[in-house]
Amino acid sequence: MTSSMLFNATTFLFLISTILFIAFLATRSSQVGLSASITAFLGWGVETVAIILRWKESYDMGHGHAPLSNLYESVVFFAWTIILIYGIIELKYKYRVVGAFVLPFALFGMAWAQLGLHSGIEPLVPALQSNWLLYHVITCFLGYAAFAVACGISIMYLIKAKAEGDSSDASAGGVIGMFPSIRVLDDLNYKAIMIGFPLLTLGIVTGAAWANYAWGTYWSWDPKETWSLIVWFVYAAFLHARITRGWVGKRAAWLSIIGFAATIFCYLGVNLFLSGLHSYGGGR
Amino acid sequence: MSTSKRGFVESLWEFFCSLKLSIVLLIGLALTSIIGTVVPQGNIPPEYLQTISEAKFKLYQSLSFFDMYHSWWFMLLLYLLTVNLVACSIKRLPRVWKMVSEPQLVMEDGLEKSLANTYEFKVSGDEAAQKEKLKGFLRAEMGEPVVTEKDGATHIFVQKNPWCRLGVYVVHLSIIVIFVGALIGSFFGYKAFVNIVEGTSVDTVFTQKEKPIKLDFAVMCENFSVSYYNTGAPKEFKSILTVLENGQPVKGYEKIPVIVNDPLTYKGITFYQSSYGQAGEGAAYHFNLRRRGGGEAVHLDLKKGEAATLPNGAKLEVLESTQDVRQFMPEFSGPAAKVSLTSPGKAPESFVVFKNHPEIEEQRGGDVFIQYLGADEKLYTGLQVAKDPGVWVVWSGCALMVIGIIMAFFMSHNRVWIRISGGRAVMGGTASKNPAAFEQKFESLVEKLKKL
Ligand code: HEM
């Protein structure tokens, strides 16, 4: 058994889970919902094994390193962290339907990685040979994943808020009737960002620490660094916007979506469109 | 006049205390920061200049877009942020500090009505004994209670984590600490680079603008080497450095290997492996030449950039060389040289000779057999040099920020009061964060009270 087979199985399980979540929205059957969640977590379990196996495979090839060193590996890890954060939020707050808006992010990541990205295990270039790589990538991606979950929740918020605005009847039926109330969605959005913001902060700090250790400058306004700071500013604005009245609800949801768009640009756009130090993953 | 002046100062103060300003500044910083990721910063590549018009270039230049993170207007935004931060804290901190240092010990009716969690119960029997019992109960559940007698009622108060209310201010302070650290670094530190040829030492480094900085010690490069993976990709760049004081090696700083991600620090100055190259002058290549099919080997030393005439009249010249060919041709290893051989009356031919692979030369054919013995070419190591006395301030600020965020997000100031008067008691409670979790906690308190 190879890690690549397991990654394929993961992609397949995320696909099944996404379909089950759509069926869950359509049928409102709690059994379907439960099986959607279980499939997602099963996929996550398989992916965990796959990541560990890939790690081991790199050692077998004689240049062992954590599987976090190129675009393929980071996209796969991103999908893993998304399901992790979603799992924490589902287990803690028990709103299963959120999965329907989060699973597609993970499925998309896995499908893209499996179909479109170069998946070979390559030795680490000298610049990446540091334990800081591990701390930096793990914290950043956990933060990104929390923002992905917050974005999914914000999309639900906007759909729900629109439906409630359109029909005077506050408890709109159908699919949307299954969504948690907009108050709960707003709160979940905040909670997901409360998980993501400290992690992003740690990600930026570990990145700065690493840069200082490797080059002697903790901050050099490289495009990737700058974009991570932009993301950080957006979420800091989000947190403050909540404190002043009038910036909860719709505007907060939009800010969360904009924040995630900036996150994705920071993660992928910078590599694809701008140049800089993070050759990391460069769109091969 | 004086009232309008006061009005102005007051409204300026209000302006700086406003959270709306913070949001505008944060978003403004986010938006303007984008510019510097799109427009090249520092040294502008000529290819970029060709893509923009003269007028646009002038405009960008006058707006400092080519060094925008150090431009006056970006700095202004950062300073405004700092002033905003300080003003907000000055305005709000006293109130929060009071809440932490002088907790509200009694639960009056007004407070009781504002609480989301209350529970009323009867106290029967000996009131003093009951009070002790309730006090013991709260002590076991939450911490040391404070008892206050007021207007004939007894108030028992207990709280948890009051100081987490300061978390937000710790975060804000940390931002200022980081700014201070950055300023210290920019005033008292520098970034520089230096190239050291193997076997030599230097005591002067150069800033980006080629300004020399003399160190009060010297650094010697004993050796520089590159190793490769079997794919040909570089695995490690390694300099062996020795620090010299007055020409003498310093104990503990002799023959220190410095690789990417593992620098050397001496007297607050750090040397980072950054680049390398061939020290051009004086390099010599060594060959043994013999006629194919036998004969004496002739030794040849060839200087870089020079051509030698061989006994058969052919001209030999070295075009390029490497100490390890693996990076270009993963299937080979060791030193190699690309040579150009011009036999009389023939067109020049160029090929590669390998020190470790004479069989390749065997297969080449031709008049002369060229055995490459290697070069005594020296390499230089390129080191980044940095001095930043502010960096520890920056790290303290970062640590403070993480601590502050944990305090602000994940800790809750919980307060519980019990008021006892005339055979009845009311328990009330509130939390600064996560009301749902506190509600559960309060309910479990109530359950335990019932069994008391
Ligand atoms: C323009 C500068 C800033 C000002 C004036 C400002 C002001 C404030 C104020 C007044 C609060 C509310 C405190 C309260 O609840 O009483 C707050 C909360 C907070 N601020 Fe700032 N802030 C600024 C920048 C930042 C930045 C750059 C960060 C980034 C880490 C930050 C992180 C926070 C956090 C984490 C909270 C707590 C939010 C919450 O409880 O949800 N602040 N800020």
Image (cartoon, rainbow, N blue to C red):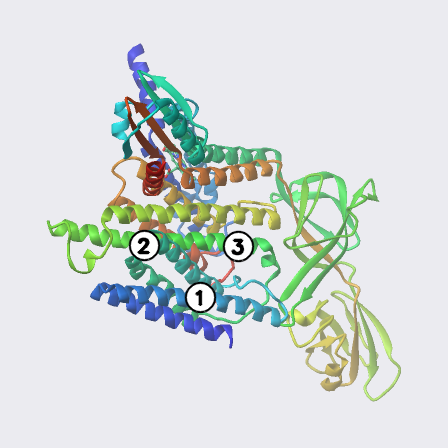
Confirm whether circles 2 and 3 share one chain. Answer: yes
**In this view, the mark in front (1 or 3):** 1
Task: Name the secondary structure under disc 1.
Answer: helix
Which residue sits at x=30%, y=15%?
B151
* Residue B317 as seen in the image, left or right of residue A1: right
- Quarter-of-image position of residue B327: bottom right
From the top left corner, tell me how far across and down residue A35 is, in percent: 32, 67
Residues at marks 1 and 3 on the same chain? yes
Q: Disc 3 on helix, strand or loop?
A: loop
The spot of residue A259 in percent (x, y) is: 35, 49
Quadrant of ligand 1 in image: top left
Q: Amino acid at mark 1?
A: Gly
Say which of B114 and B388 sits in front.
B114
Q: Going from the N terminus, do you reach mark 2 or mark 3 first?
A: 2
Subunit bearing disc 3? A
Q: Amino acid at mark 2?
A: Lys
A6 lies left or right of B156? right
* Residue at the disc numbered 2: A94
Relative side of A157 to A206, left or right: left
Q: Earlier in the sequence, mark 1 or mark 3?
A: 1
**x then y, percent, for residue B442:** 34, 38
- Classed neighbour count for the residue bearing mark 1: other residues with Cα under 10 Å, few (<14), some (14–19), many (≥20): some
B401, A21: nearer the viewer: A21
Label 3 sits on residue: A277
Q: Are marks 1 and 2 on the same chain?
A: yes
Q: Chain of mark 1?
A: A
Which residue is disc 1 drawn over? A45
Which mark lies nearer to you, 1 or 2?
2
- Please tell me whether residue A83 is drawn above or below residue B434 in the rendered image: below
Which amino acid lies under the numbered mark 3 shown in the image of this protein? Leu
Which chain is mark 2 on? A
